[in-house]
Amino acid sequence: MEERLKELRAKAMALPLEPGVYIMKNKDNEIIYIGKAKKLKNRVSQYFGSQNNHSDKVRRMVSQVKTFDYIITDSEFEALILECSLIKQNQPKYNILLKDDKGFSFVKVTGEKWRKISYALQKDDESAEYIGPYTNGFYVKQAVEQANSIFKLPTCNRRFPEDFGKARPCLNYHIKLCSAPCTGKVRFADYNESVEQALEFLKGTGNQSIKNLTEQMYKASEAMEFEKAAVLRDRINAIKKLADKQKVIETKVKNQDVIAFFSDGNKACFEIFRFDEGKLKYREDYFVDPPDDGNKARAEFIMSFYNTKTDIPRFVTVDGEVEDQELIERFLSEKKGKRVYIAIPQRGQQKSLVDMCRQNAAERVAKTRGAVLGRELRVLEELKELLGLDILPSYIESYDISNTAGDENVAGMIVYENGRPKKSAYKKFKIKGFSGQDDYGSMAEVLTRRFEEYLKLKDDVKEGEEPEGFARLPDLILLDGGVGQVRAVKPVLEKYGLPIPLFGMVKDDKHRTRAIVNEQGEIAINANRRLFTFVSSLQDEVHRFSVGYHRTRRKKSQLGVSLTEINGVGNERAKALLKHFRTIGNIKNADLEELKAAPKMNDSVALSVYYYFRRKESEGDK
């Protein structure tokens, strides 16, 4: 252990066994991490012991620690409050920090005669009216778009009445999203009434808007203004249709936040759904460093998120355990002035909401990977949890052996990257070490050859480059077979010192995927439909690939044998003939001059081939 760590550990071992806050500092005396502890000595000393038990993130932090301070508190709850306050003040590099860069949002109403409604991030027009501020830009932007659409208000840059009749109406008019005042055919009174109704919709609730519009519709109908009544009817129906869409995501709990996070090991995202009056009002997402401990990460995130909030809901629903849950509930309750509950649902509607929230977090992470979909990352996370893997299995290799009673013994290797087949990385193997049927021996040979190639190539990968092909190690190996195949391959991994998770995929008597297996036994997957479908498709794909290669080998072998029966035609000439003419039928039908002109042929052999097939035809006629 280096001298610095020894000194820090000795200092940590002298700390009291009391609750408090510890403050890690670097060589420039900058605060890089703040934490709390129930017993300062036990918690802080863990950082400066063996580094083998720490994650990469913790090791990086410890490597920068020059010294640390501490503050003793009377209770763990006081330590929690102090930790939260100090993190807010100092913004340490290694704590979960939520940058409040989303700012405030406004509904902007222009000050001109023909007013327009838009979404704005700041007040930059003294002549305009602003409604707000609102803390969630997503909600404001969505509401403004809905209001302009329902009440058919323009969203273009044309000015009225200056631009009346200067150009044709845009696409929005033709798809019934705008009344096209640019034509000069819309009365100002009607336009202004639409603006007022849109503002009422934005300021109030959908139900109140429907009530007021219904009253106006009846008045217009009684006054025999049927065209106006029809317009109001259409607006009422549009608002109702919007409300129906919102009911798709509705909860019996009137006011709550749903929080979930997803990490692929490189990126991590917390997603929040805010429900008000039982309806999903808005969502927010925050990217953070991939957490080492999900329970601790949830606790840090909740404290950081609500530390600056005043509108704390009564219920906070999360997707997993929260470290110090009771202390955090107490903190939120005191801040709100009412009892706040943190819940971890296991079934029912609340569990579905958490799953949906987590799926959205996965989708945010997926966008950072380009074309990858959140559902694919989600199934990989489920596979990681089921198999107890340390990292997300983003790069999976799968192997299968194929032969016919030991004849043309081959293997296929397929690769799934980010939950999708990566066909450019597929590989074919012809078994060379022995003849006859031995699936276990074949599997061991294939994996040996694969990792021998890795050892040859790994040092050629330049720093900063992503290794490809055999130069890249998989995060997980899945063999098409049971525990026998796993036991045959395990010594290969041990021989090369490769700690790659290894499992088999077993099928039932109807040749359908049944379970994943290792030396400890079977792991059922049929309870999880998404995971079952993924593993089944992977097993079917590796089987298809290896069997296809085997059939190709057998076909070529059978064709080659028929040609090598001819005097003067060996394996090399047979291959050359097949490559040139493509099929036996073409060779059979070729004339003598064509055979003579073929690669690796001479006049004598060409005559042998020519008369061989004519003699065969003659024998067949008899």
Image (cartoon, grey):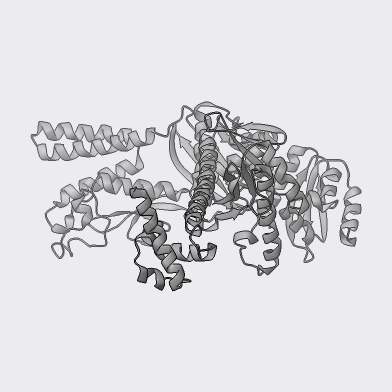
Q: Is residue 541 left or right of residue 292?
A: left
Q: Nearer the viewer, residue 582 or 533?
A: 582
Residue 487 at x, y percent in the picture: 72, 41
Residue 453 at x, y percent in the picture: 67, 61
Q: Nearer the viewer, residue 569 or 538?
A: 569
Q: Is residue 500 left or right of residue 543?
A: right
Q: Can the viewer see residue 28?
A: yes
Quadrant containing the N terminus is bottom right
Q: Is residue 580 left or right of residue 438?
A: left
Quadrant for residue 296, please give it. Answer: top right
Q: Can the viewer see residue 263?
A: no
**What residue do we see at 76% from left, 54% from top?**
496
Name, please, the residue furthest toward the front: 622
Residue 350 at x, y percent in the picture: 52, 30
Q: How many marks?
A: 0
Query: On screen, 442 above or below 589?
Result: above
Quadrant for residue 244, please give it. Answer: top left
Residue 378 at x, y percent in the picture: 54, 43
Name, please, the residue furthest toward the left: 224
**What residue do we see at 73% from left, 38% from top?**
77
Query: On screen, 388 above or below 145?
Result: above
